[in-house]
Amino acid sequence: MKNEKAKIFVPLLDTFEHADIQSFAKACIQTIPSYFWDVGASSTGKYHPDYALGDLGLARHTCAVVRFLNHMFQIDCCRSDFTSRERDLLRVAAIMHDSRKSGSDADFTWDKYTKFDHPILAANEVRKVKGFIPEEEMELVAKTIESHMGQWNKDRRSRKTLPLPETKYQKILHLADYLASRKDIEVLFRANELHRRETRSNETPSNSAPSAEDYIFDFGKHNGEKLLDVARTDPGYIAWAKSTITREPIRTLLEQL
């Protein structure tokens, strides 16, 4: 990825079910303006939780939207509403929904508010990423992005009106975005995640992966606890982790249980 901070999206990309849509998502990420990685999700700080403010705040908000989608996809009554390809297309829409929050890099200034038509701008950029998936799938992603603002679709200053969510794709993305913007819902992110990941990869030889006996969770509700202890005390969490977590070494260790 051309921006080191974009590595925050790697766990999201690991949840994709189809290689071609994952490649499409990666190509879309390459089009995101550089300011995206340095700003919060809210230009005023009024409308988003603390984790979505400051440096990487908009990126963390984006991660939260995909996480909410993935949680909903674990529920049978939600998962069954979408094919595996549709689930991946929704993940792309979530990653790109705010990718033009302040327009292009040329448009951006630190004192500038969110561009009201940013859903349309983001959708149009997605439409330019050709050659990875069929046009009708690309259009599904774009149309889903366009309506993600939901009922907050009118701008009194410009008299612009954005599309309202109508399809099941548009409604579930809007719901995930709404949940990710609630001040009373906290999403956990590890401190200095990128730096810590790079430090571990530099210091730990590839042939010395931890064993199931030694592995300690460094994320989530069992942060600081040993894997085998969690397997004994919270088997439901282990079942969830086996169906959800894809990053190594935890993926391999879970398969050993």
Image (cartoon, rainbow, N blue to C red):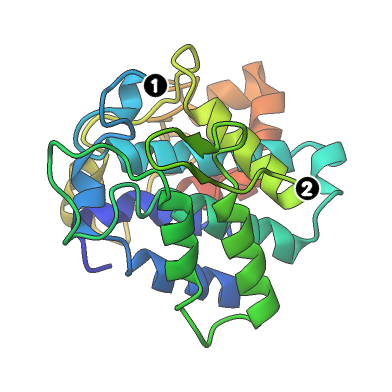
Residue 55: mark: none
Query: Which residue in the structure is indicated by mark 2?
Result: 168
Q: Amino acid at mark 2?
A: Lys
Query: x, y percentage for residue 114?
Result: 31, 40
Q: Residue at x 64, y 32 (%)?
A: 238
Q: Quadrant of residue 244?
A: top right
Determine whether 223 is above or below 73 in the image.
Answer: above
Residue 18 visible to the viewer: no
Secondary element under disc 2, as helix, strand or loop, is helix
Image quarter (top left, top right, bottom left or bottom right) of the C terminus: top right
The amino acid pointed to by label 1 is Tyr
Query: Which badge, 1 or 2, comes first in the chain's sequence?
Result: 1
> Where residue 181 sits: x, y (%)?
47, 26
- Foreground residue among 104 and 137: 104
Label 1 SS: loop
Which residue is at the far top?
184
Q: Is residue 113 above or below residue 160?
A: above
Residue nearer the viewer, 53 or 212: 53
- The quarter of the rendered structure image containing the N terminus is bottom left
Residue closest to the far bottom: 131
When the figure is inspected, residue 55 is found, relative to residue 104, above or below; the finding is above
CB within 8 Å, label 1 to label 2? no
Residue picked out by circle 1: 47
Q: Which residue sits at x=32%, y=20%?
A: 50
